[in-house]
Amino acid sequence: MSGLRCRGQFQKERHMPQKLIDQTTIQPDGSPGDDAFTAFAICNENFEDAEARLVVLEAGGGEAGDRLDTEIAARAAADAALGARIDAEHSLLTQESADRIAAIQAEASARAALGARLVGNNVLINGDFDFWQRGTQFANSNTYTADRWFMQQGFVTGQLYWQHTPLPGENNFPDSPYTLAINITGNTDNAQCHQVVEQRVEDVRTFAGKVCTLSFRVFNGGAAGRKIAVEFAQTFGAGGSAPVLGISPETFTLAAGMNYIKKTVTMPSVAGKTANFGHAAVVALWSSAGSNFVSRTGGLTPQTGSLYFSQIKWEPGAVATPFERRPIGLELALCQRYYCKSYNLATNPGTPNSDAGRIATGIQIGGTNSPSFTAYALRFPVNMRNAPAVTLYGAVSGNPNKITMSDNADSTGVPTARGLNGSGCEINWVNNAGTFGGWFHFTADAEI
């Protein structure tokens, strides 16, 4: 076949080997191998075949290049698609992360808001006078009345602090189970007379250098024109800096009936002060005062009449917000950090024959009563502010510093409280002859 073969023809014969020139076979004329004409013919055929192969290779190389370009383009498109998917997934992950962060922040805010609702922003404890563990009526001075509220009075007559119970459906105190009622009928010294109730908030740094607001309701049982005063103070504990009294005092003139009082103040900084154990920020409500106290009351004069206080709140900021109630169990636990007892909440300490809640221990050995030494591990309902002052009462007699024996008589000796700390103590006593065990109540006072 002469001439170049087509690609199809070559592909069909692409495995044909190249022809070789015979150089050894003896020809009829006696010469070895192919003659020159035959040899050149073979060379030409080989050249033709080689050229055809090159043409095919060139053509095939172009197709390979096209295929390579196509593959490169396809891979580039795939890479672009993969990159787009990665970018999309990254964006999705970024959005998910942002959403999760936002969700976490929202949950934290919700928890904080819930905590604020549960605990509230009122630094005063028992601000609506729910708890009266020490009793319900007080005439003497320098004593705690309702839990956390300390009363001082002097040179006055007819003085009394008591627990007032609003009647069902009473419009003046619809949300308050009790109010703090105060009465005074006269003042015997226009300079020295005073009647004031205060709460000492643990930690003098409370609101130091900051704006805060006091608000409360007070019902004036007398005619319009009755006055009260509000005072703030800072105390620094025994051996600490001198107390700062008369911080922004103000006198308020009351209308007859219900009054809503608000007072905003910036408490002084305590920088450079020395604060020892028992330091506190103080708010005081004056119901009468002589001229000796003008710098602490803003000019309050001697007053008489009955007042009823409720919903007292001391909070951060310049705006008085509505009174919020903490869960009643939490409010009680906050009170018990400063004062607790074994008696029922409604039972005054020292009440005789108080079986409910009394502490009992006793062992009778071999049918005989053993006048032995007894030790009892006492635990308080909450950890108290510090090691409290513990008073023991005979369960039957109600007498202080006594233990009721198995014959219902008081112990002859005085029991002792040992190993006192904020969580409890050990009570020791020696039984009277012929008795065993012991029955008693206790109070524990860790007030400021």
Image (cartoon, helix red, strand yellow):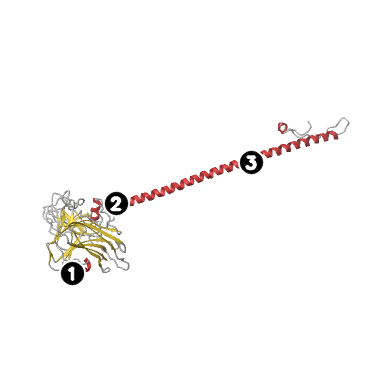
Quarter of the figure that contains the C terminus: bottom left
Please tell me the numbered disc located at residue 373: none
Mark 2: secondary structure: helix
Question: Which amino acid does the dot numbered 3 rest on?
Answer: Leu
* Earlier sequence position, callout 3 versus callout 1: 3
Camera sees residue 23: no
* Earlier sequence position, callout 2 versus callout 1: 2
Where is mark 3, residue-wise?
Answer: 68
Question: Which amino acid does the dot numbered 2 rest on?
Answer: Arg
Please tell me the numbered disc located at residue 291: 1
**Foreground mark, 2 or 1?**
1
* Vertical side of 437 occupied by 159: above or below: below
Q: Nearer the viewer, residue 133 or 61?
A: 61
Locate residue 122 relative to residue 157 in the image: left or right: right
Where is mark 2, residue-wise?
Answer: 117
Q: Nearer the viewer, residue 365 or 125?
A: 125
Residue 226 placement (x, y as % from top left): 17, 61
Residue 175 placement (x, y as % from top left): 21, 51
Q: Quadrant of residue 74?
A: top right
Residue 62 placement (x, y as % from top left): 68, 39
* Vertical side of 6 occupied by 211: above or below: below
Q: Quadrant of residue 192?
A: bottom left
At x 27%, y 59%, the residue is 213
